[in-house]
Image: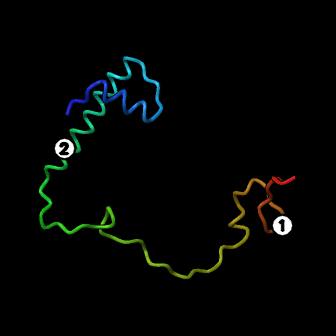
Amino acid sequence: MKLQLEQVRHVAKLARLSLSAEEEVQFSTQLSAVLDAVDALAAVNTEGVAPTTFATLTAARPDEVRDELPVDVALQNAPQKEGTSFAIPKVIE
């Protein structure tokens, strides 16, 4: 599907983008390619394919209780520590 420059200008205006003439031509070509790809997907027969909620068919791992993380391990990469806590600069005056 070939986009007209006026359509590209309209999309740019909606996105509040200021495009040069060269960019308008470039985006016209690129957006047309995206729309062609979507058209190709629309042509795929999905009859009888059940909808899914995940991109993969496997769900996340189940939660499991583990031992606490030792303080020295938790703070090993901290740039600054104060006792058993992270030290951060005061942000409220």
| 78 left or right, relative to 8 | right
Q: Residues within 10 Å of mark 2 (few under 14, many from 20)?
A: few
Q: Nearer the viewer, mark 2 or mark 1?
A: 2
* Separation of residues labelled 2 and 1 (CA atoms): 60 Å
Asked if 68 appears above or below 33 in the picture, the reply is below
Q: Nearer the viewer, residue 79 or 29?
A: 29
Residue at left offset 33%, top offset 29%: 8
Reading the image, the residue beneath label 1 is 83
What number of labels is visible? Answer: 2
Please provide percent x and percent y for residue 51: 24, 67
Compared to residue 91, the image places residue 12 above or below, namely above
Label 1 element class: loop
Front-most of residues 82 and 89: 89
Who comes first in sequence, dot 2 or dot 1?
2
The image quarter containing residue 35 is: top left
Amino acid residing under circle 2: Asp
Residue 81, image x and y in percent? 80, 60
In which quadrant of the rendered image does the N terminus lie?
top left
Quadrant of residue 4 within the rendered picture: top left
Q: Front-most of 19 and 78?
A: 19
Badge 2 marks a residue whose secondary structure is helix
The residue that label 2 is drawn on is 39
Determine the residue positioned at 15% across, 60% down. Answer: 46
**In the image, what residue type sits under mark 1?**
Gly
Camera-nearest residue between 10 and 84? 10
Q: Give the residue furthest to the top.
A: 21
